[in-house]
């Protein structure tokens, strides 16, 4: 019996390795194919910004949005970031994606301003875009071409970018702020636990990660801590992933100014976001 068991384990192992090799190969091939498709998609303008409303917790007014990338794939339909962001990051194409999303957002903000709508839109900045020495000239060009003021754009970065804690990071943040951009820390609380950077870096906003909001109102210790941090450090606070009225009530009681989440809306195509804006400003 023991022999038999050993034999089948070996067989299974051999087969396992055999399959593993093949699937590695297949995976590498499909990753290459995906990169090729992304490159082509970027050339053909298949990526577009969706807008998730950012809402004033107290008045319910839509004060802005977060821009989130979507891929209108010619055969596979509408694709979400988890299916293309990792490949974009590995291949370096993420910088071009971020640039295109930023340019779309800036054009749209200028258009809204022409209609008398003052909104602020936040855009996710990848680590490699943030580290790119060309960043400020790319941004300058986007502002010039669109006529959008920098103050209408908030750049979202993640805590891990601040981990390095070096002079270069500090200078980059300071120069972005000097250009007029607001800076937000995305997914706050899920990354690095050294809070020193909150005092050392020029920042405007903390976005509390959805994982902390989902436990509210029962599990409130960390959201409470983050609310106090924002108050003391005079940072704006945005709650992410708000799905229930109970969560919103809790945030209001704590004085959190803004939220995003399915309670108001999922991220919407520009057309649907514009429709929502019409509704929300229509007389009640
Ligand atoms: P993120 O920046 O933290 O964006 C929030 C994510 O949470 C979005 O997922 C949004 O659709 C989702 N979400 C919002 N409200 C709720 C809610 O109430 N409940 C739940 N369950 N989810 C909610 P999405 O659009 O799939 O984006 C995922 C991530 O991909 C983003 O996380 C961001 O890190 C990245 N990403 C998206 N667009 C871009 C981009 O243009 N450039 C870069 N570099 N990254 C992007
Ligand atoms: Mg974000
Ligand atoms: Mg986030
Ligand atoms: Mg997140």
Image (cartoon, helix red, strand yellow):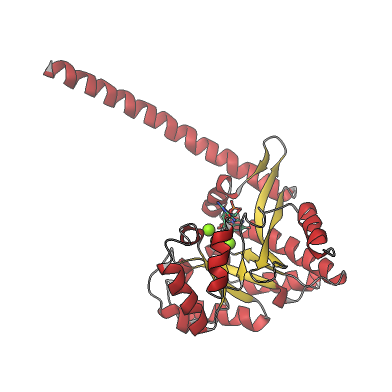
Q: Residue at x 52, y 64 (%)?
A: 127
Position of 104 with respect to 26 (left or right) is right
Front residue of 228 and 248: 248
Q: Residue at x 23, y 23 (%)?
A: 10
Q: Quadrant of residue 190?
A: bottom left
Position of 77 with respect to 148 (left or right) is left
Q: Quadrant of residue 130?
A: bottom right
Q: Quadrant of the C terminus?
A: bottom right
Residue 16 drawn above or below residue 158: above
Figure disc tally: 0
Location of residue 76 in the rendering, given as x and y in whole percent from the top left corner = 67, 36
Residue 204 drawn above or below residue 48: below
Location of residue 17 in the rendering, given as x and y in whole percent from the top left corner = 33, 29
Location of residue 53 in the rendering, given as x and y in whole percent from the top left corner = 69, 61
Location of residue 118 in the rendering, given as x and y in whole percent from the top left corner = 78, 73
Front residue of 111 and 19: 111
Position of 3 with respect to 106 (left or right) is left
Q: Residue at x 58, y 78 (%)?
A: 204
Q: Residue at x 87, y 69 (%)?
A: 115
Quick check: can you spot residue 41?
yes
Residue 229 drawn above or below residue 35: below
């Amino acid at each position: 019996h023991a022999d038999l068991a050993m034999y089948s384990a070996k067989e299974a192992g051999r087969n396992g390795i055999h399959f593993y090799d093949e699937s590695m190969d297949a995976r590498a091939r499909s990753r290459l194919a995906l990169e090729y498709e992304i490159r082509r998609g970027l050339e053909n303008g298949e990526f577009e910004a969706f807008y998730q409303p950012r809402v004033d917790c107290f008045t319910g007014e839509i004060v802005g949005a977060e821009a989130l990338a979507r891929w209108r794939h010619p055969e596979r339909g509408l694709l979400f970031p988890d299916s293309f962001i990792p490949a974009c990051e590995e291949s370096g194409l993420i910088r071009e994606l971020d640039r295109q999303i930023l340019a779309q957002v800036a054009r749209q903000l200028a258009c809204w301003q022409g209609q008398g709508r003052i909104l602020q839109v936040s855009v996710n900045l990848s680590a490699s875009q943030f580290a790119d020495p060309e960043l400020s000239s790319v941004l300058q060009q986007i502002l010039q071409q669109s006529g959008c003021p920098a103050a209408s754009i908030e750049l979202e970065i993640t805590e891990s970018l601040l981990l390095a804690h070096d002079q270069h990071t500090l200078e980059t943040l300071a120069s972005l702020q000097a250009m007029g951009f607001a800076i937000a820390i995305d997914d706050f609380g899920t990354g690095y636990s050294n809070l020193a950077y909150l005092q050392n870096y020029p920042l405007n906003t903390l976005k509390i990660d959805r994982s902390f909001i989902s436990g509210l109102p029962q599990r409130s210790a960390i959201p409470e801590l983050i609310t106090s941090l924002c108050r003391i450090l005079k940072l704006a606070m945005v709650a992410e992933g708000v799905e229930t009225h109970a969560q919103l009530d809790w945030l209001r009681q704590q004085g959190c100014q803004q939220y995003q989440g399915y309670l108001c809306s999922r991220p919407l195509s520009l057309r649907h976001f514009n429709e929502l804006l019409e509704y929300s400003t229509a007389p009640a």
